[in-house]
Each structure stands twice: as C-alpha cells, then as structure tokens.
Amino acid sequence: MALGLTLSPEQRDRLLDYLQLLLRWNATYNLTAVRDADAMRTQHLADCLAVVPALRRHVGDRAARLLDVGSGGGLPGVVLAVLVPSLDVTCVDTVGKKAAFVRQVAAELRLPNLHAQHARVEQMAGHFDVITARAFATLADIVALTRGRLADRGVWLAMKGRRPDDEISALPVDVDVFHVEPLSIPGLNAERCLVWMRRRDGT
C-alpha cells in the first residue's frame, strides 16, 4: 500500500471490522465528528497507519507497553494494537462510552493486547514505554499530564499537524524533542508530523 505497509489478510479484515464498529457506534455515541466511511478511512485509518513504520523502528520486535491518551474511539491505539502485536496497548479516555467502545473492539476483533480505561490519565497507575496522543492537547500539557506514567527511557510520541514550533518552545527544559518526523498521508491534503520527546537525562 502507499504507506509502505504490508498488511496480512487478518490485519486488513480487523481494520475493516473496526471501521464498521466505529461507524455503527458513532451513530449513537458520537465517538468522532467524521461520519462518512470514506472520510474515516483517510482521516482516521490512514492517518494512524502512517505512524506504524516509525513505531516499529522504535520498538523493533521487543515487547513494549503503549499508552494512548485521550484515545476517543481508539485512534491510534486500536490501529497500533492490530499492526504491532508485540505492543500491549492501553487506551485511556475520560468519557466512559468511549472506553466501553474500545473494550468492545478488543473483544470483537480478538485483540488480547488491547485494553481500555475510563480514567483521568494523571490518576492512573503503571508505567509505559511509549505514550502517544492524537489531537489531545499541547505538547506541554501532554508532558505535564503523563510525566508520571512514562517509564525509564520511555518516549512520548505526539501526532500533530504542521510542525508545532510554538509548542516545542513552550516545553519544560528537561524535555528533549529529539526528532520531528514529517508524514505523508495518501488522500489527505494536510500537513502531518510526529513529535518524538524524552526526558533529557534519558531516565
């Protein structure tokens, strides 16, 4: 496919089943403002699939824990759980119906590596190797809310539109933006990038 990803038939089927679940639940629970199936494929699925090569490069084949903050309908958490099975993915959202939807997705798609919590992230327990966020908050707010959940040598992976230089300059001095990775999303005429961050002391 255009993103350079090769999907197994099972992964492709799971993503299509996820899209159908998202469409069905969205009619009642307002999981996303995007209503059209074709628009969901581009604005949600393709957008999240674009993260997969970068994440695979980072984690390799090792087992890792990923926290998807403000996950909403499971984006990008569900997509990452399908495409990177070595990841143990937890989606957290303050809206109970959204967490319930992700639990339903995990059950119906048979994804034992996908979990959901209805909670405020700052009140959670545990530590994660990767913390990701998509359309959730500024970089400084992401760091402030999730700093206590980042494991030793963990990284933040923020999905953003155009390069957020103002947000980068507002980060605390102990946070290092070590890479800003531009993304190209087929069919999406908009800028996208990944902002990789870590603690400056590496711990």
Image (tube, rainbow, N blue to C red):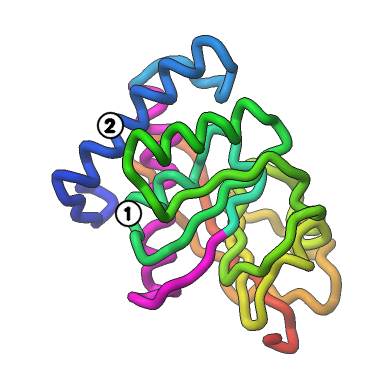
Identify residue type, mark 1. Answer: Leu
Q: Does residue 53 lie above or below 153 as drawn?
A: above
Q: Does residue 146 lie above or below 107 as drawn?
A: below
- Left or right placement of residue 122 versus residue 14 in this view: right
- In magenta stretch: residue 53: yes
Observer able to see residue 166:
no
| Outermost residue to the left | 9
Rendered residue at 39%/77% (across/down): 62
Q: Please give the residue where the numbered disc 1 appears in the rendered image.
A: 83
Quarter location, residue 117: top right
Rendered residue at 50%/36% (across/down): 102
Q: Please give the residue where the numbered disc 2 appears in the rendered image.
A: 16
Question: Whole-Å distance between the Cαs marked 2 and 1?
Answer: 13 Å
Identify which residue, 49 or 75, lies in the foreground. Answer: 75
- In magenta stretch: residue 157: no
Image: magenta residue range: 38-66
